[in-house]
């Protein structure tokens, strides 16, 4: 009997990795960064400070999840499937959005 070789699958990125990817994408897309700053009420200096806060990853994911064209553009750029972003966002967002808040 021959055993099939195990398929090597890449682990899904965690929420923090996705948030870092979103931030990197925003840095490469000036219009999207401007939109994020405008909607969040941040400016460049407060963005740096806010990036150290616990809610930063959730805010970045909320930004892309709230606007489907942004989610699709981010996913196309990063190679991270929209469903993976949605799952990570739900985990971070807590019970109100079907997540755990973990």
Image (cartoon, rainbow, N blue to C red):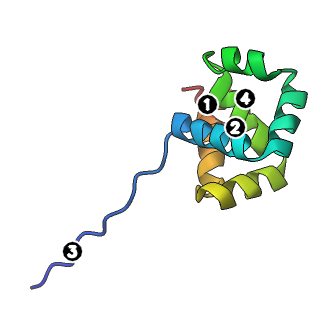
Circles 2, 1 touching at the beta carbon (< 8 Å):
yes
Question: Along the polypeptide, which appears first: circle 3 or circle 4?
Answer: 3
**Left or right for 6, reference 14:** left
Circles 2, 4 touching at the beta carbon (< 8 Å):
yes
**Residue located at (21% from left, 78% from top):** 4
| Residue at mark 1 to residue at mark 3: CA–CA distance | 35 Å
| Residue at mark 2 to residue at mark 4: CA–CA distance | 5 Å
Q: Name the residue under label 3.
A: 5
Q: Which residue lies furthest to the bottom in this view?
A: 1
Q: How crowded is mark 4: few (under 14 residues within 10 Å), some or many (20 or more)?
A: some
Mark number displayed over residue 92:
1
**Residue located at (78% from left, 23% from top):** 44
Secondary structure of the residue carrying tag 4 is helix
The picture quadrant where one finds residue 8 is bottom left
Q: Mark 4 points at which residue?
A: 59
Q: Residues within 10 Å of mark 3 (few under 14, many from 20)?
A: few
Question: Along the polypeptide, which appears first: circle 2 or circle 1?
Answer: 2
**Residue located at (87% from left, 21% from top):** 41
């Amino acid at each position: 009997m021959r055993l099939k070789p195990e398929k090597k699958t890449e682990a899904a990125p965690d929420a923090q990795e996705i948030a870092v990817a979103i931030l990197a994408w925003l840095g490469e897309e000036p219009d999207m960064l401007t939109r994020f700053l405008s909607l969040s009420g941040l400016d460049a200096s407060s963005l740096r400070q806010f990036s150290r806060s616990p809610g930063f990853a959730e805010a970045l994911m909320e930004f892309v999840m709230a606007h489907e064209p942004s989610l699709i553009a981010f996913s196309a750029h990063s190679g991270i499937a929209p469903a993976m972003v949605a799952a990570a966002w739900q985990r971070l967002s807590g019970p109100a959005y079907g997540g755990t808040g973990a």
